[in-house]
Image: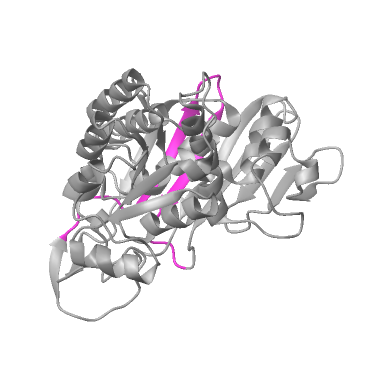
Amino acid sequence: MRSFRNIRAAVVGTGFIGLVHVEALRRLGIEVTGIVGSSPERAAAKAGAHNLPEPYESFEAMLGDERVDVVHLATPNHLHYDEVRATLAAGKHVVCEKPLAMTSAQTVELLALAEASGLIHAVNFNQRFYPQNLNTREVVGQGDLGDVRLITGGYMQDWLLYDTDWSWRLEREQGGDLRVVGDIGSHWLDLVSYMTGLRVDAVMADLTTFMPIRKQPVGHVETFATEGGGETRDRAIETEDAVGLLVRFEGGARGVVTLSQVSAGRKNHLHWEINGTRASAAWRAERPEELWIGHRERANEASLRDPGKLQPFAASHTTMPAGHSEGYGETFRELYRAVYSAVAAGEPPAEPDYPTFAAGHEQALIGDAIARSHAEGRWVAVQR
């Protein structure tokens, strides 16, 4: 097995999330050979600000670098399909941000190509790797909550609250037909299915666009930027600001989900509650150390992350002692620890402990059902 110190990566995309990838890789001891930006000038500025090597002049130049073993794609959604294809064709392992591609026809093709290649492939569903979420998967699997009956929660943010807020994700041609579903809903749906082992069977969806016209700045805007002012132009918005979703899971469990990017005060409010026949559990990402356990016949519990009390797989993905908080950045590090362990081994494991392209394709299929449900005003089954 190779050492992590002998594995090299390149990151494509220099926005907020691309630099999170870089930082997580550095913490694992993975050498980042360089980054690729939307322009050489933008990439050079980010490389200088973050003490990175000279950036690659282009995506093609990066693929031509024989030192690069793994490519991380943190680019706008519409670029993923072509970039993944090219990366696999170059014989390099790939970690792709969600969504894996713009359509399920594209994701099923990428999944087939990746599986045939023998290369490691992953989608960046990092929310799985909070220790309390990993632990909940093992607890549910052991039957501690009993049979799962109801899964509720959602994912709410406020960074697109005003009509002057802007991101490339608002542009349908770059972000896709489903904005809130693809950007944050996919995280929630992937996470609860991962923890419970239950796939989504059917959905009833209500998508709402509260601001059909927004003020698009003339010039580049960083994701989560809050600066206002400057020249703008009116732009029609074709994607949703918020979603109400009813879910039927395989096996009979039910779900109720709220998704929003226009909820004032909610910065990154991913939250879930699982109600079983024996007990309940609940968690929220903005207080990730805490897990609530609910009982009928005795007092409820508030459990704080403690490596000595976690289930084995969860314990293997937490490094700080109890009382020393871990958070968002650590989820990337631990996801990549799992991915790069497979890279070091030289082949994908029989049962990957990280989200592969199969998880990305699954979310594309659920997205198809959500879009059709909203358009037709009825329950729609996920077509696998």
| Residue 97, image quadrant | top left
- At 41% from the left edge and 64% from the top edge, which residue is drawn? 158
Q: Is residue 14 above or below residue 281?
A: below
Span highlighted in magenta in the image: 236-264
| Residue 361, image quadrant | top left
Q: Is residue 246 above or below residue 244?
A: above
Q: Nearer the viewer, residue 327 or 236?
A: 327
Q: Position of residue 170 (x, y in %)?
A: 24, 56
- At 54% from the left edge and 54% from the top edge, which residue is drawn? 27
- At 52% from the left edge and 56% from the top edge, which residue is drawn? 269
Q: Nearer the viewer, residue 51 or 141?
A: 51
Magenta stretch encompasses residue 241:
yes
Q: Position of residue 310 (x, y in %)?
A: 75, 40
Considering every residue shown, the one lying at the far left of the view is: 233
Residue 141 relative to residue 369: left or right: right
Considering every residue shown, the one lying at the far bottom of the view is: 229
Q: Is residue 252 above or below residue 210?
A: above
Q: Position of residue 30 (x, y in %)?
A: 48, 48
Residue 28 relative to residue 280: left or right: left
Considering every residue shown, the one lying at the far right of the view is: 298
